[in-house]
Image: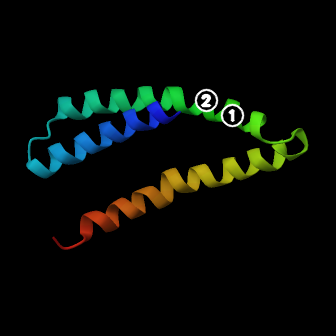
Amino acid sequence: MVSADVLRGVAVGLMALLSLTGALELWHIAVLAAFYGAGTAFFSPSFDALVPEVLPARELAQANALDQFVRPIALRLAGPALGGVLIDLPR
């Protein structure tokens, strides 16, 4: 899971660096999105398999409900909102 997160972080970091230097092109975005997707493809199943190993069976339903509530909020609301705020900050 850590390597998958590192891969995703490097992909996002490279995209930010290319954007800040004005060198970002469409093919960069396509390649980096593929690397980000590969990281997600490894992270998500690992995370889903780890939860039952860590929690007792009686708490799995609550953990899954919490995960299904928090993850979409973080990915579709909080993350883009934070990105917008960071972009809007004066330099």
Q: Which residue is mark 2?
A: 46
- In the current view of this chain or complex, which residue is farthest to the bottom? 90
Q: Three-letter amino acid code at disc 1? A: Leu
- Residue 50 is tagged as 1
Q: Residue at x 18, y 46 (%)?
A: 17
Q: Quadrant of the C terminus?
A: bottom left
Q: Identify which residue, 42 or 56, lies in the foreground.
A: 56
Q: Residue at x 31, y 42 (%)?
A: 12
Is disc 2 placed on a helix, strand or loop? helix
Q: Is residue 16 above or below residue 53?
A: below
Residue 76, horizontal then vertical, whole percent = 49, 53
- Could you say which quadrant of the image residue 15 lies in? top left
Do the numbered discs 2 and 1 sit on residues whose CB atoms are within 8 Å? yes
- The residue carrying pointer 2 sits among few (fewer than 14), some (14 to 19) or many (20 or more) residues within 10 Å by Cα, namely few
Residue 66, horizontal then vertical, whole percent = 72, 52
User: Spatial distance from mark 2 to mark 1, Cα to Cα?
Assistant: 6 Å
- Could you say which quadrant of the image residue 44 lies in? top right
Residue 37, horizontal then vertical, whole percent = 42, 30
Q: Identify which residue, 13 or 90, lies in the foreground.
A: 13
Q: Residue at x 26, y 63 (%)?
A: 87
Q: Count how many numbered circles sit on residues in the image.
A: 2
Left or right: where 13 falls relative to 6: left
Q: Which color scheme did the rendering employ for the protein?
A: rainbow
- Residue 39 is tagged as none
Q: Three-letter amino acid code at disc 2? A: Ser
Residue 18, horizontal then vertical, whole percent = 15, 43
